[in-house]
Amino acid sequence: MKSSTKNIIVVASVAVLLILWEAAALCIGSENIMPGPWATLVATIKLFGQKDFVFVVLSTVFRGIVSFVIAVVLGVAFGIVAGLHEGFGAFMKPWVVVMRSTPVVAFVLLALIWFSKSTAIFIGVLTMFPIIFTNIVTGIRNVDAKLIEMALFYKVRRRSVIRNVYVPSIAPFMFSGISSAVGIGWRAIIVGEVLSQPRYGIGGSLQLAQMQMNVDVLIAWTIIAVLLGAFFEKIIRLIENVTVKRHI
Amino acid sequence: MLRLNDIYKSYDGNAVYSGFSLEIREGVTTGILGPSGCGKTTLLNMLGGVLKPDRGEINGIDGKTFSYIFQEPRLLPWKTVRQNIEFVLEKYYAKDSRDRIAEICDSYLQLVDLQDFADYYPSQLSGGMSQRVSVARAFAVPSDIILMDEPFGGIDISLKRNIMEKFLKICENDRRTIVHVTHDIDEAIAMSDDVFVLSKSPVKVVFEKKDVKKENIAALKDAVIGSL
């Protein structure tokens, strides 16, 4: 399909969403319960004018970046060891299964008791780590053994084999893991903020808007969270396109 | 001379080599024929030093450098043809010798008629072209010994002839010790100076002939077939 046709379909899809939203708002007939797209847009623009808007957004972004960095460092390090040593992979399996299958809310409630203010970061790491870890392990196990053997036969230096064979083989898996992790982790961090109520944070602002029945503000913060999440995923994709060469 | 003396090698208790000995002349191409699974690849791996025999000695390989041509081209898909050759060449040249490395790549790519494809990726090449790159790669490395494991096995007959001609052309000007393992009699006779025929478990030399090119090829072929 042509990219111009795809773009038209995407625009049409957004238009249908907005029409349905407006129709639902008109049916309900109360801006306090279901504000329409226009009222929400006004609320969103108003948010930008609030004096602590930047602090709220930056606080959540900061928590996102910190938990992302920790999850990537741990996920890549543990993933490499588990990918190369089957025994360590087997050791990590139950940990990763527990992290992947425990509901985020259960971790949030526990983290509230254990960490209080750092809950969101902890939750972010806990949701992102297993995804990155699993993808790195899969990447390492998918490295073509025949290419490694070729390098071994030619006695290519170990550092060169890592740089020229292992890294390019694992990179697509790593970026795919990071991309999924960012989407899931970003949402988990905001859930963590909703429950841990830090002084500044998008999650806390969502909770406040809900308590005050400011539905337009609640949706406005949601839109900002969605846009920021999409922005981070886009950055990851851009880095992937620049660094990963696709000639396979 | 490369000498395998009284070699023993087993896998899971099954003796593949049991008191096996062989002498390979240096500076010529030695064809090693044998049925599939008889241990020809094991022999190459032992010669290349990536596999140790359980017992016995291999003389004449200490300090030698090796190149390999595998059955599949084994090219890095994310690197261009030139970069693939540079990848195995780097360790032989100083970091400031990029021009020299590029020159070597170009000269060997020219010998296999791929000078115009240096910046192509393996996915953009046919199977035969990729295998020619692996031939260029093996010769570009300043190795003493080239080990070839059924290098033309997966290629169709017309391409095979073309690659073999290119290979022989390079060999004329660049004599090295080449050990060529194959189960194709015609290929072994066409490409080798010396031919050995091996039997299966435990491996034994059942036929050998030096200076094959001086022989009556039809009679030699019959003798090889008779020994298998």
Image (cartoon, rainbow, N blue to C red):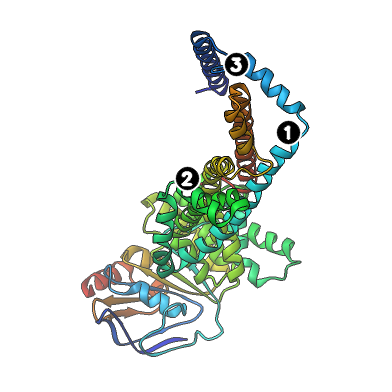
- Which disc number belongs to residue A53? 1
Disc 2: which residue: A105
Q: Position of residue A148 (x, y in %)?
A: 49, 65
Evaluate whether label 3 is on the same chain as label 1: yes
Q: Position of residue B83 (x, y in %)?
A: 62, 56
Q: Amino acid at mark 3?
A: Pro
Instruction: From the viewer's perspective, tell me whether residue A101 is left or right of residue A179.
Output: left
Marks 3 and 1, Cα distance to the nearest angstrom?
21 Å
Q: Amino acid at mark 2?
A: Val
The chain holding disc 1 is: A
Residue at image position (47%, 46%) is A104
Evaluate whether label 2 is on the same chain as label 1: yes
The chain holding disc 3 is: A
Looking at the image, do the residues carrying marks 3 and 1 touch, with CB atoms under 8 Å apart?
A: no
Q: Is residue B212 above or below residue B166?
A: below
Instruction: From the viewer's perspective, tell me whether residue A175 is left or right of residue B131.
Output: right
